[in-house]
Amino acid sequence: MASVTARTVLVVDDEANIRTLVGDYLRRDGFTVLEAGSGEEAIDTVARTAVDLIVLDVRLPGIDGIETLRRLRRTSDVYVLLLTARVEEADRIVGLEVGADDYVTKPFSPREVVARVRALLRRRDTSRPADRVDLGALTVDLAGRDVSVDGAGVTLTALEFDLLAALASAPGRVFTRRQLIERVWGWDFFGDERIVDVHVRKLRKALGDPAEDPHIVLTVRGVGYKLAAA
């Protein structure tokens, strides 16, 4: 995996044994691993060090994982993989709404964590044509990863941009949730397909596309989503 061997992953959990377990598996797969035992320490680490992905436990002492994620999203679009308790569905939904890219439920297999990390980072490694898509008010610079609406720049997370880029690859074409998952999360993603709906809502909000009457990212009921062709 030459494309990910130099990548840095920050593992954030208040339990040292979990940090060690996850960290050891990631190191075996060629990643550089940093550790943090609290949300405050994680925020400080990201401010000082270039990090490619964060494995973030939701149940942290002090500021919890959701609040940590909320603060990180003010300044960083780093990929975030949440660790959540199996019974806490609300944590997963809120985490995705706040800006998480994926989640793994506890108890988990460390191999699954590594697979999810690789799948998330693979998207950033995937080359895209140096193209620019102009669709009326919306402009998407695929090479520069820049987006604007009516000439005003739009700030997107890495995953939101990847989702928009997938839709922009064929304006007017309807993509099913499974097709979007394969393009954005990777063919080996094995989570809930509703994750697409969560991130479409977030993408629309960032684009100023009203959920009750969207004109950029359109819903095709019973099928999936498409980008308005004009």
Image (cartoon, grey):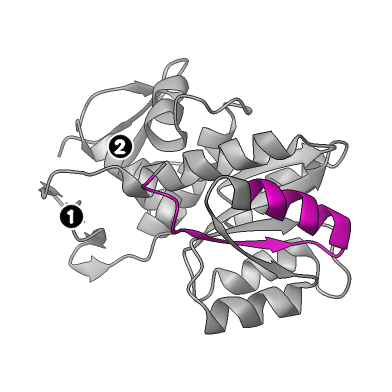
Find disc 1 in the rendering and name its residue. 143
Judged from this view, the residue extending furthest toward the top is 222
Instruction: In this rendered view, identify the residue nearer to me: 144 or 201.
Output: 144
- Using the image, determine if residue 147 lies above or below residue 222: below
Q: Residue at x 46, y 21 (%)?
A: 178
Instruction: In this rendered view, identify the residue nearer to me: 105 or 225.
Output: 105
Left or right, 168 with respect to 1, comes to left
Residue 166's disc number: 2
Left or right, 61 with respect to 228, comes to right
The magenta region covers 2-26
Instruction: Specify the quadrant that holds the C terminus.
Output: top left
Mark 2: which amino acid? Ala
Check whether the beta carbons of the residues at disc 2 and disc 1 lie within 8 A of each other.
no
Instruction: In this rendered view, identify the residue nearer to me: 123 or 175.
Output: 123
Q: Return the disc, 2 or 1, that comes first in the chain's sequence.
A: 1
Instruction: Name the spot of residue 44 as percent of width and height, x first.
Output: 64, 83
Q: Residue 204, can we see it?
A: no
Instruction: Name the spot of residue 188 as percent of width and height, x first.
Output: 51, 25
Residue 51's disc number: none
Instruction: Name the spot of residue 171 as percent of width and height, x first.
Output: 19, 33
Mark 1: which amino acid? Ala
Instruction: Specify the quadrant that holds the N terminus.
Output: top left
Instruction: Name the spot of residue 172 as percent of width and height, x first.
Output: 21, 28
In the rendered structure, does residue 24 fall within the stretch colored magenta? yes
Look at the numbered disc 2 and give the secondary structure of its residue: helix
In the rendered structure, does residue 69 fall within the stretch colored magenta? no
Q: Residue 74, can we see it?
A: yes
Among the 4 quarters of the image, the one containing residue 183: top left
Q: Residues within 10 Å of mark 1 (few under 14, many from 20)?
A: few
Left or right, 69 with respect to 15, comes to left
